[in-house]
Image (cartoon, rainbow, N blue to C red):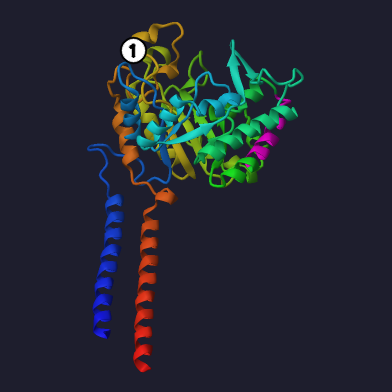
């Protein structure tokens, strides 16, 4: 009997050693993953997720578009055009939206859910007030407004358990262009919403987003400091440095003009909180902003070089495909941001495509996907198995002693 146990023990030991070696090999192969041929990146590993918004092209199906996005991104911003925040829960329940969420999931993308309290109507920034609320509802301090907002956030969090939930996009826009007096009401609303979300979805990471370029140029860093860091998980920023000065001359004509501490200084105000760059980009439109494909690549490499010591959680390029065709550059309504895509609207890949693909392929050590966890879990399994074997031996000896 003992011989049988010893044989089983040896077999188990060899099996466990094999599992451990396999885990190590998996880690090694991950670390040594080959980047796109001929492309050198400023980083050899990343601790952040990469994202892109699956904007449409001229002829592709939604399945093709989302499949392409899923091939170069981990996450995506879940934006609904012309859906006010107070209709979000209802919109999410629609069959078409449920189908879209299924497509996002099957494409390997994690959606970043969002509620936003302000909108632009006829060129003006306004507070989005549900039409059925009392006419006295004029600001974010109104009880009925706050209750409805929190109800929406709770419903979304409870029903979808989102990994990421943005509860205010480019919120400084509201301060500068709508109501400075009302902003403190938003600050307190964030804290209340945070608590409510955590009650039904404790693992959801809640954050808000600022326009970094505007905060910097307006010296609006104090807006970040208004928020209770115990009631927020991440700080988010959008950034398009080439747009500073628009429609006049560009403050930064090329990426190398950007100050080296342009991004790192945000840490003076965000503390130890991880940082989300929910939208970054550089235009390829020479006509509208003096951009080019080469400058897009230059900006991405510059960005990665100068943010590699920051506690990044997500880095997301604005859009997969340009919002307009090259022929539409002369349209009076065309804007530089319409040409920030990784791919032209006709499907032709820009130079930046290969670099973004390389960034996606850089070994990722995000905690929940970290290779270290594979090793740790394997070691725990080995320890438990060995303990079980030793216990079996002890029981066998005790049985024979009797």
Q: Position of residue 255 (x, y in %)?
A: 42, 28
Residue 181 falls inside the magenta stretch: yes
Residue placed under numbered mark 1 in the picture: 326
Label 1 environment density (alpha carbons within 10 Å; few <14, some 14–19, many ≥20): some
The picture places residue 388, in percent across and down from the top left corner, at 37, 75
Question: At 40% from the left edge and 17% from the top edge, which residue is drawn?
Answer: 323
Q: Is residue 250 visible?
A: yes
Residue 119 at x, y percent in the picture:
59, 20
Where does the image place residue 199, in percent across and percent down from the top left? 62, 45
- Identify the magenta region: 180-194
In which quarter of the view is residue 344 placed? top left
Q: Nearer the viewer, residue 173 or 167?
A: 167
Q: Is residue 110 above or below residue 297?
A: below
Which residue is at 72% across, 24% downward? 139
The residue sitting at 39% across, 61% down in the picture is 377
Seen from the viewer's position, the closer of residues 292 and 323 is 323
Asked whether, in this view, residue 179 is left or right of residue 41, the answer is right
SS majority, magenta: helix
Q: Quadrant of residue 165?
A: top right
């Amino acid at each position: 009997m003992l011989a049988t146990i010893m044989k089983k023990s040896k077999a188990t030991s060899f099996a466990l050693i094999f599992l451990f070696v396999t885990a190590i090999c998996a880690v090694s192969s991950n670390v040594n993953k080959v980047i796109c041929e001929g492309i050198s990146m400023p980083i050899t590993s990343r601790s952040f997720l990469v994202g892109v918004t699956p904007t449409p092209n001229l002829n592709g199906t939604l399945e093709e578009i989302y499949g392409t996005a899923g091939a170069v991104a981990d996450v995506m911003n879940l934006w609904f055009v012309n859906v006010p925040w107070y209709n979000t829960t209802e919109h999410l329940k629609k069959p078409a939206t449920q189908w879209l969420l299924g497509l996002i999931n099957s494409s390997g993308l994690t959606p970043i859910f969002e509620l936003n309290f302000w909108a632009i109507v006829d060129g003006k920034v306004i507070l989005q007030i549900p039409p059925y609320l009392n006419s006295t509802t004029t600001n974010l301090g109104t009880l009925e407004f706050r209750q409805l907002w929190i109800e929406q956030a709770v419903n979304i969090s409870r029903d979808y358990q989102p990994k990421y939930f943005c509860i205010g996009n480019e919120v400084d826009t509201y301060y500068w262009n709508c109501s400075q007096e009302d902003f403190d009401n938003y600050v307190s609303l964030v804290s209340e919403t945070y608590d409510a979300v955590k009650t039904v979805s404790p693992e959801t990471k809640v954050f808000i987003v600022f326009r970094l370029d505007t905060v910097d140029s307006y010296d609006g860093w104090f807006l970040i400091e208004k928020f209770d860091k115990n009631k927020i998980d991440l700080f988010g920023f959008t950034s398009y440095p080439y747009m500073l000065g628009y429609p006049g001359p560009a403050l930064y004509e090329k990426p190398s003009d950007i100050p080296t501490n342009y991004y790192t200084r945000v840490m003076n105000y965000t503390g130890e909180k991880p940082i989300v760059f929910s939208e970054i980009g550089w235009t390829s439109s020479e006509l509208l902003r003096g951009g080019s494909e080469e400058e897009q690549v230059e900006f991405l490499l510059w960005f990665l070089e100068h943010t590699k010591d920051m506690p990044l959680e997500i880095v997301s390029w604005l859009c997969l495909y340009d919002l307009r065709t090259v022929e539409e550059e002369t349209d009076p309504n065309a804007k530089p941001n319409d040409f920030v895509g990784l791919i032209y609207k006709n499907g032709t890949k820009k130079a930046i495509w290969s670099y973004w693909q390389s960034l996606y392929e850089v070994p990722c050590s995000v905690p929940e996907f970290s290779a270290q966890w594979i090793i740790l879990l394997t070691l725990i399994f080995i320890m438990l198995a060995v303990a079980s074997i030793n216990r079996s031996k002890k029981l066998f000896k005790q049985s024979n002693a009797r």
